[in-house]
């Protein structure tokens, strides 16, 4: 489900038993407020279960054994955004740096244009050509981003959101589903660094907060 997990499977050759699960079975733009909140809470429960499970958790045993849940911001449907999606079919592959000496090949699949907290923003959304060779990841898109909460409540290196290729010229971005790179929890993982062009000049008080080791 998580990009850094897929990335590690691809480049570090770790076991890949986990299957990608895409977002809600119907577009969140069609859901009412209470249904969106339920979808957010379901995501949080699924993520907590993943981190508790020794087969899927990025947490070292010393943290996982006492793990009782990630620290999330309160579910806020104001952070469920319908963005205009500008496809970029002529974009060339590029190498994205990671937290180790490895690099991953990415393509800018499209650019999301939206308004958040009263300001206009845009974010690049990426696709990994290697992952598209696997049937279950053919529709997978990767959105890493930085914002003004980084280092002040959220991980300083930014967060990730999993997406899938949309139909049409719009895409739903639910910032409540923003999660930390696995290397926040365990240094054995190699995690893509967020490109500077994906810095949002606003506070995104949604999704997973920074990890405090206990």
Image (cartoon, helix red, strand yellow):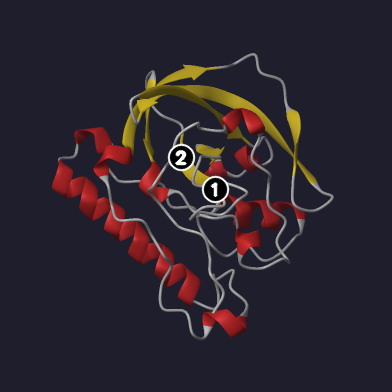
Percent x, y of residue 73: 36, 56
At 65% from the left edge and 32% from the top edge, which residue is drawn?
196
Q: Which residue is more in the foreground, 189 or 211?
A: 211
Q: Residues within 10 Å of mark 2 (few under 14, many from 20)?
A: many
Residue 150 shows which numbered tag?
Answer: 1
User: Nearer the observer, disc 1 or disc 2?
Assistant: 1
User: Whole-Å distance between the Cαs marked 1 and 2?
Assistant: 21 Å
Q: Which percent across, then down, holds residue 173?
A: 39, 36
Task: Give the number of marks.
Answer: 2
Residue located at (46% from left, 40% from top): 163
At mark 1, the secondary structure is: loop
Q: Residue furthest front?
A: 152
Residue 29's spot in the image, x, y percent? 25, 33
Please name the residue that numbered disc 2 is placed on. 163
Q: Quadrant of residue 82?
A: top left
Nearer to us in this view, 106 or 15: 106
Q: Residues within 10 Å of mark 1 (few under 14, many from 20)?
A: some
Q: Secondary structure at mark 2?
A: strand
Instruction: Name the residue located 59 percent from the left edge and 68 percent from the top edge.
Output: 58
- 8 left or right of 151? right
The residue at 61%/38% (across/down) is: 132
Residue 8, image x, y percentages: 69, 56
Q: Does residue 184 appear to the left or right of 202 in the view shown?
A: right
Q: Is residue 40 above or below residue 87?
A: below
Depicted 45 relative to depicted 23: above or below: below
Which quadrant of the figure has residue 56? bottom right
Name the image quarter holding the C terminus.
Answer: bottom right
In this rendering, position of residue 62 left or right of residue 1: right
Identify the residue at the far top of this view: 90
Q: Earlier in the sequence, mark 1 or mark 2?
A: 1
Closer to the camera in the image, 79 or 24:
79
């Amino acid at each position: 489900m998580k990009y850094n997990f897929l990335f590690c499977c691809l480049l570090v050759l770790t076991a890949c038993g986990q299957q990608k699960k895409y977002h809600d079975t119907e577009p969140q733009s069609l859901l009412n407020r209470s249904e969106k909140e339920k979808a957010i809470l379901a995501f949080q429960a699924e993520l907590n279960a993943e981190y508790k499970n020794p087969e899927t958790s990025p947490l070292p045993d010393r943290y996982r054994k006492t793990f009782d849940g990630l620290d999330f911001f309160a579910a806020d449907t104001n952070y469920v955004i319908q963005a205009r999606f500008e496809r970029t079919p002529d974009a060339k592959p590029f190498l994205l740096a990671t937290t180790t000496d490895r690099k991953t090949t990415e393509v800018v699949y499209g650019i999301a244009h939206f308004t958040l907290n009263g300001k206009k923003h845009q974010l690049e959304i990426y696709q990994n050509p290697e992952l598209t060779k696997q049937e279950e990841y053919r529709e997978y898109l990767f959105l890493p981003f930085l914002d003004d909460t980084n280092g002040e409540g959220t991980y300083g290196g930014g967060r990730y959101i999993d997406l899938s290729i949309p139909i049409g010229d719009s895409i739903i971005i639910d910032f409540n589903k923003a999660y930390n790179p696995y290397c926040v929890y365990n240094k054995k993982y190699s995690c893509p660094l967020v490109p500077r062009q994906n810095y949002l000049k606003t506070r995104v008080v949604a999704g997973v907060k920074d990890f405090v080791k206990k």
